[in-house]
């Protein structure tokens, strides 16, 4: 595989905040703990060792044993589970929603980044063990974000009524989606493997949590990945004291609001990803996940008749901690309480809200992890590479907005020069002399001279545009081929990884896909990879 890369900021697809974080910009230093360099993990290990109680490790191990009951796992995953009992074992975590059939392609990149970092850490710190963890977002309730995936330029969608945490949703109706997908896949060994994966995951499992665990385990289990479900009463007991501080004292709201204010004061003008609420927990039951609000001296579950006095709330939290579901602001804290974690790997949007959280972690006395942007990549097949070569296009060209790409290449291949910059400079020079004459004779004519200059420059610009448009018509075939290959690699004028499902690449590469990505994605390099295979 030929590998190339681009700095994130040169792609045009990532926020200033994340690009500045990758550049380790000094103004962002107060908002994270340690920068993601391999040498910085030494101190992170020491801090987490001192901050993570043995009892949490024991509870985590027991909870995972229960979650994996009846799941066929590899020797490497068994080793990962066993190692989690040991005080020399630490985790690297990524999280993702329970998107149908993994959703966008970057699901693979997140998990491979996580696995590869644990391998690199083991080489650097051989005294310790490092386990990759995928945190399933089973308690999310935004069904419309996860109920589809894209394949063959079509949206394969699961339409049904849904409420509550998505992990608890029954898989009823997905047998029909399985048939739709099978019809789209066609024939062939790789198509059959994908069809079997979908059917075994979504038809043979009762709920979305079980289906997603099966699918992730089938794809990555041989690499020792641990898959965790936070919707677990044993694990929620560890969260309860921290939920109490949030609900009764609004600790998270106070600390995160202060951080948000500091971020907004920076001259870079960053956009705030999420804002905290006074209470950052939902009340969770079957078919229900609604915000907890405090009003008129009582705690209310939004849009329901459920309410609690302070004493009743404390009793409910103690007796049923599993009914308290953290929101986007407090879920990271929950993760770091229950896991011996060193690093969180996420996308740009995720890391943007993690950068708001350091002060709230400090207030709760929980170690703040290293934050690492996941790998991002563009996979270019041999067939696509040949097309690019025939058109004298580089992959870097394809990152341009489509109209800019067309204009740039038309100018390059045109047999006439369609750049009137020299003529515009000459015209401006000529008008300089006219301004001098007007100033020496009658200054009232300066406005008329200026108007004439603007008119003539505008005329040149219009002529340039008309000639360029005429050339585009003459070179229609070339333009169509350029836009076609760009649309192939940037579907919907977006990054491939944000649109395509992994099944598209699996049809091309089969079982070689994941080993291929694992070999060529390097998490700590923090660049956008272009993989040509």
Image (cartoon, rainbow, N blue to C red):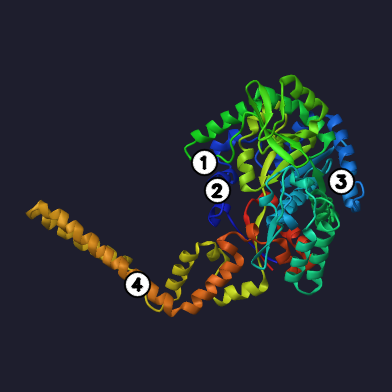
Residue 43 in view (yes/no): no
Instruction: Identify the mark nearer the N-term, 2 or 3.
Output: 2
How much space separates mark 3 and mark 1, taking CA atoms? 39 Å
Residue 228 screen position, x and y as percent: 81, 44
Instruction: Identify the mark nearer the N-term, 4 or 2.
Output: 2
Residue 24 screen position, x and y as percent: 58, 42
Residue 372 screen position, x and y as percent: 67, 45
User: Taking 454 as reference, is 37 above or below it?
Assistant: above
Frontmost of labels 3 and 1 is: 1
User: Taking 156 as reference, is 80 above or below it?
Assistant: above
Q: Are marks 2 and 1 in contact (CB under 8 Å)?
A: yes
How much space separates mark 3 and mark 4, taking CA atoms? 65 Å
* Residue hosting label 4: 466
Instruction: Identify the mark nearer the N-term, 2 or 1.
Output: 2
The residue located at (81%, 72%) in the rendering is: 189
Instruction: Identify the mark nearer the N-term, 1 or 4.
Output: 1
Taking the view exactly as shown, the residue that stands out farthest to the left is 441
Instruction: Identify the mark nearer the N-term, 3 or 4.
Output: 3
* Residue hosting label 2: 15
Q: Secondary structure at mark 4?
A: helix
How much space separates mark 4 and mark 2, taking CA atoms? 35 Å
* Residue hosting label 1: 270
Q: Return the residue nearer the eye: 422 or 231.
A: 231
Q: Are marks 4 and 2 in contact (CB under 8 Å)?
A: no
**Crowdedness near tag 1: few (<14), some (14–19) or many (≥20) residues, C-alpha within 10 Å:** some
Q: Quadrant of residue 10?
A: bottom right
* Residue hosting label 3: 80
User: Taking 60 as reference, is 113 above or below it?
Assistant: below
């Amino acid at each position: 595989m030929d590998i190339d890369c681009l700095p994130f900021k040169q792609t045009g697809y990532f926020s200033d905040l994340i690009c500045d974080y990758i550049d380790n910009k000094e103004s962002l230093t107060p908002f994270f703990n340690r920068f993601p360099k391999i040498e910085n993990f030494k101190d992170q290990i020491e801090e987490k060792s001192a901050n993570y109680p043995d009892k949490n490790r024991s509870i985590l191990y027991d909870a995972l044993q229960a979650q994996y009951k009846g799941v066929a796992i590899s020797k490497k995953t068994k080793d990962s589970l066993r190692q989690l009992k040991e005080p020399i074992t630490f985790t690297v975590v990524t999280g993702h929603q329970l998107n149908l059939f993994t959703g966008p392609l970057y699901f693979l990149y997140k998990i491979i980044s996580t696995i590869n970092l644990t391998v690199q850490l083991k080489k650097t710190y051989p005294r310790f063990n490092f386990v990759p963890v995928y945190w399933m977002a089973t308690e999310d309730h935004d069904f419309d974000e996860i109920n589809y995936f894209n394949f063959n330029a079509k949206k394969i969608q699961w339409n049904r009524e849904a409420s509550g945490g998505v992990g608890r949703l029954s898989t009823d109706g997905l047998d029909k989606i399985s048939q739709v997908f099978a019809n789209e896949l066609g024939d062939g060994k790789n198509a059959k493997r994908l069809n079997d994966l979908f059917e075994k995951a979504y038809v043979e499992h009762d709920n979305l949590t079980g289906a997603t665990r099966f699918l992730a385990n089938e794809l990555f289990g041989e690499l020792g990945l641990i898959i965790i479900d936070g919707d677990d009463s044993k694990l929620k007991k560890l969260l309860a004291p921290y939920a109490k501080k949030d609900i009764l004292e609004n600790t998270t709201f106070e600390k995160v609001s202060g951080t948000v204010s500091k971020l907004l004061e920076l001259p870079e003008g960053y956009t705030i990803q999420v804002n905290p609420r006074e209470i950052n927990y939902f009340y969770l039951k079957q078919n229900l996940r609604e915000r907890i609000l405090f009003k008129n001296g009582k705690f209310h579950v939004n849009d329901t008749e459920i309410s609690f006095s302070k004493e009743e709330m404390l009793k409910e939290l103690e007796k049923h901690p599993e009914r308290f579901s953290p929101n986007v602001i407090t879920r990271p804290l929950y993760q770091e309480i229950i896991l011996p974690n060193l690093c969180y790997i996420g996308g740009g949007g995720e890391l943007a809200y993690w950068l708001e959280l350091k002060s709230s972690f400090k207030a709760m006395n929980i170690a703040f992890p290293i934050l690492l942007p996941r790998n991002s990549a563009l996979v270019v097949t041999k067939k696509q590479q040949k097309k690019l070569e025939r058109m004298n296009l580089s992959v870097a060209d394809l990152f341009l907005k489509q109209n800019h790409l067309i204009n740039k290449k038309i100018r390059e291949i045109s047999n006439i020069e369609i750049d009137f910059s020299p003529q515009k400079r000459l015209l401006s020079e000529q008008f300089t002399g006219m301004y001098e004459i007007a100033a020496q004779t009658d200054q009232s004519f300066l406005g008329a001279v200026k108007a004439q200059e603007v008119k003539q420059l505008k005329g040149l610009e219009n002529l340039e545009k008309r000639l360029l448009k005429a050339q585009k018509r003459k070179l229609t075939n070339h333009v169509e081929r350029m836009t076609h290959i760009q649309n192939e690699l940037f579907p919907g004028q977006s990054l491939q990884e944000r649109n395509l499902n992994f099944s598209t690449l699996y049809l091309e590469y089969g079982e070689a896909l994941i080993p291929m990505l694992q070999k060529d994605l390097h998490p700590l390099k923090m660049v956008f990879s272009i993989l040509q295979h």
